[in-house]
Amino acid sequence: MRVLNPATGEIVGSVADTPAEQVAARIAELREHQREWAAIGANGRKEWLLKLQDWIIDNTESLADVLQSETGKPRVDSLIDPIFGSDLIGYYARRAPKFLADEHPAPHSPLSRVKRLTTVFEPYPVVGVITPWNFPLAMPILDVIPALAAGAAVILKPSEVTPLSALELARGWSEIGAPPVFSVVTGAGATGAAVVDNADYIQFTGSTATGRRIAAACAARMIPYSLELGGKDPAIVLADADLDRAAHGIAFGGMFNSGQVCISVERVYVEAPVYDEFVAKLTANVKSLRQGRDDRTPRYDVGAMANESQVAIVSRHVEEAVAAGAKVLTGGKRTGEGTFFEPTVLVDVDHSMSCISEETFGPTLPVMKVADEAEAVRLANDSVYGLSASVWTGDKARGERVARALNAGAVNINDIFANLFNFALPMGGWGDSGVGARWGGAQGVRKYCKAKAITTPLL
Ligand code: ADP
């Protein structure tokens, strides 16, 4: 399978389309090695994870080169995956021993006073991780590392659009000389399906449609899974907000990675008294973004989209909105050679339009005027998704009140993406945005474990 740089159309690599029986064989091998990996304990595994962290830090630039070549991202964005990834590895390497330690819950009745109570956490043997193309190194790290820390072996099936960064991660694992408990298989949906058919736990990040299929396949095998799916994240700008900060944050939240982020801002609701002023500031911010094809010198804020099908979705959402009466304040069309779509602000939109109701995953910010806080909350909650949201206000108590009213797995007040960089917090969507155990904190590793209860007589 060929790998393309979407910014240039150049072929930058090719990978195998791994057949199902090879996937099954690889998983059987991993299952053999996993026993030893579990046996060295969380503190033993910590040493290997910290070596991997060092390897990533030492290879940041070359990892960014590979990632940039398969995504067409600007240079600055290409550096984010190794930086975020190495930080996350440090967090889980150091904390997993505590998260996985036996627990002794306090007795709560005369009956339990005559026993010592113990909860132990035993890893699933082989965790299958299936990842998308938007963060080709960070997503694998986010899903693979907690599973390795838990004592599982991991088989990773990265997106066929961006498999090269995941192969670099596997190279790092073998270069540090770590035990053979992490393996990457490349290929498309059929390879992913073979992972689902053979692993003991599935961690999937991708589209809601594929997530549903995977959930059904896991149910048939009675294996656990966790799904991180799409989103349509709202931003709510209240009249008492710092409008400069809100406009700047929302422009970044909507345009970062060309909007190809599950938690990017996809809809904006603004209280009527500040609507005109906010829209002017937002448009100015979006217009100021530099878009283009970067090399190793950072020059651009917004790069290419991942592939033609993404450009087609964004184009359709903008065209349908305009046909139904929406106005484009800036952007609105593809530009240059390669898969570039201009950063776009849309107004006069409503909930009947695809740009507001469907996930766009592109550089568009549709903005709606609302009468008050209550209407903003009602419209923000009018979605099948519930991943994350932001609220912009000068009153923190008001911000928290709105946060509690929103149907979302995370809400940032006067900020964008802040929850994701605080690894102790749970991160996971509601509704069509996902099910199952979450990323972050103790549950980020415990989800890869079976809990066992042991009672020991005291007498
Ligand atoms: P997108 O179309 O945006 O790439 P998908 O959800 O289709 O999103 O893909 C996410 C990941 O899931 C990719 O690695 C892809 O190869 C994989 N995949 C697609 N179909 C299946 C399937 N039926 N079973 C397992 N994995 C799949």
Image: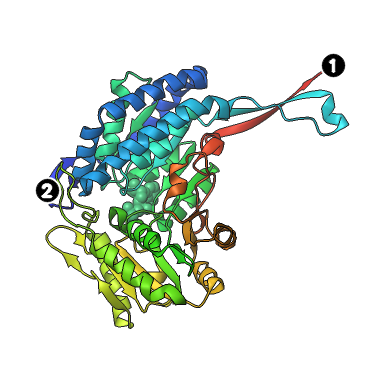
User: As rendered, which of 190 and 301 lies closer to the eye?
Assistant: 301
Report helix, strand or loop for mark 1. Answer: loop
Whole-percent x and y of residue 328?
27, 75
Q: What residue do we see at 36% from left, 79% from top?
A: 348
Residue matched to label 1? 459
Tell me if mark 1 has few (under 14), some (14-19) or many (20+) residues whose alpha carbon lies within 10 angstroms of its own: few
User: As rendered, which of 82 and 159 lies closer to the eye?
Assistant: 82
Going by the image, does 170 lie left or right of 213? left
Question: Above or below — where is 19 with respect to 152?
Answer: below
Picture quarter containing residue 157? top left
Q: Are marks 2 and 1 in contact (CB under 8 Å)?
A: no
Residue matched to label 2? 10
Tell me if mark 2 has few (under 14), some (14-19) or many (20+) residues whose alpha carbon lies within 10 angstroms of its own: few
Query: What colour scheme governs how the chains and residues are painted in the rendered image of this protein?
Result: rainbow
Going by the image, does 188 lie left or right of 270? left
Query: Disc 1 marks which amino acid?
Result: Leu
Q: What residue do we see at 15% from left, 43% from top?
A: 297
Tell which circle, 2 or 1, labels the residue nearer the N-terminal end: 2
Whole-percent x and y of residue 386?
50, 59
Going by the image, does 184 lie left or right of 152? left
Picture quarter containing residue 3? top left
Can the viewer see residue 1? no
User: Which residue is outermost to the right?
Assistant: 110
